[in-house]
Amino acid sequence: VPGVVTGKARTPRDGGRAGRFPLVSRAVADDTPSDGEVVPLADTFVSASGSPYEGKRALVFGATGGTGKEIVKECNAQGIPCSLFVRSKQKAQEMFDAEIETGAVVNEVFEGDVSKYEDVLRAVENSGCNCIMVATGCRPALDPLGPFQVDYSGTANIVSAANRQGASVEHVVLVTSIGVDDIFFPLNLFFGVLFWKKRAEETLQRSGSNYKYTIVRPGGLQDEPKGSPGAVRLGPADTYGLPPRKAPGSILRSQVAEICVSSLAEEAAFNKTIECVAANDEPALPIAEQLEAI
């Protein structure tokens, strides 16, 4: 694979395109995380042997983003080895310097741009994954083309690359947003970001592949709870949004990650679109039980 990095002394031969380097699932001390850029992994990787996740191998797109890092943490908590797809190898090398130095390989990190099909394909082909988690996103206020290039075109590239793998890819989980069904939802003021997320959903649903899919639509994403984190509440597509729908509310990114990873093992999540919020002053309900009701 072009651009393999196994230590600090080596650099990619292809100028930095879709390179990869080993990563172990061990915590990186960092007291100043910023903008979802730090991926704090579990201190000890626990094998998924004997669990519903046994045999799962994930490739997480957007792994250093706010939601992506939580998915990585949840995968490690459940014993699912995962490879990561990130935008900047240099930034990842700085984050995971200690892990590279150990030489112990649990995960791999691929650098690339989701809007470039060759980058995506190389990661999917070489990661050995059988499930793909898509938590990519852009900042449309800073990049007007981002919603099209990342949310739609990037997801289309991931779906196309997964389709080429035949039966080796078993499941694709895509994180989008509540409100994608409503063109008047306020977030669409940012260069149609929800419009393009909806097109990404349709691309996955219409891919015609044999793998399963799960689309997870969270409410407003929070890094930390403001008071009580609230109990997770799930509903089918178009449950939350503008009236007459229920209020979209908010949810912790860590709660979204739990739903995403749970969907890999819960048959009730297969080939479904799931909307999720956190409800205050309501009792907790098992995710599996709520999925059965959708």
Image (cartoon, helix red, strand yellow):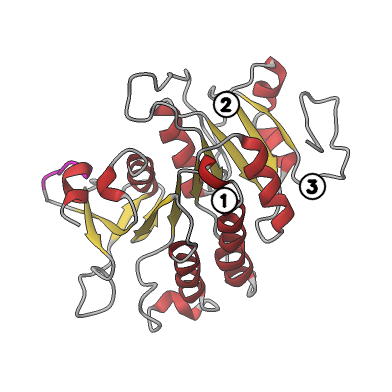
Location of residue 281 with respect to 261 vertically, above or below? below
| SS label for mark 2 | loop
User: Where on the picture, by quarter, is residue 240?
Assistant: bottom left
Relative image position of residue 134 (x, y in whole percent): 51, 51
Check residue 162 in the rendering and tell me which mark sits there, or answer none: 1
Q: Amino acid at mark 1?
A: Ala
Residue 110, position as x, y percentages in the image:
68, 40
- In the rendered structure, the answer to whether residue 240 lies left or right of residue 8 reads left
Principal secondary structure, stretch drawn in magenta: loop
For label 3, count other residues whose C-alpha is less than 10 Å away and answer few (under 14), some (14-19) or many (20+): many
Q: Which residues lie in the magenta part?
A: 283-287
Please tell me which of labels 3 and 2 falls first in the chain: 3
Decide if residue 85 is in sight here. Answer: yes
Q: What residue sits 44% from the left and 27% below the top?
A: 55
The reply to whether residue 87 is in sight is: no
Q: Secondary structure at mark 3?
A: loop
Left or right, residue 141 beside residue 280: right
Q: Position of residue 175 (x, y in %)?
A: 43, 56
Q: Residue sitting at 25 percent across and 48 percent down?
A: 268
Q: Reading the chain from its start, which is encountered first: label 2 or label 1?
A: 2
Q: Closer to the camera, 75 or 34?
A: 75
* Quadrant of res 100: top right
The numbered disc on residue 28 is: 2
Quarter of the picture holding the N terminus: top right
Above/below status of 46 relative to 270:
above
Residues packed near mark 2 inside 10 Å, few (<14), some (14 to 19) or many (20 plus): some
Q: CA distance from mark 3 to mark 2?
A: 25 Å
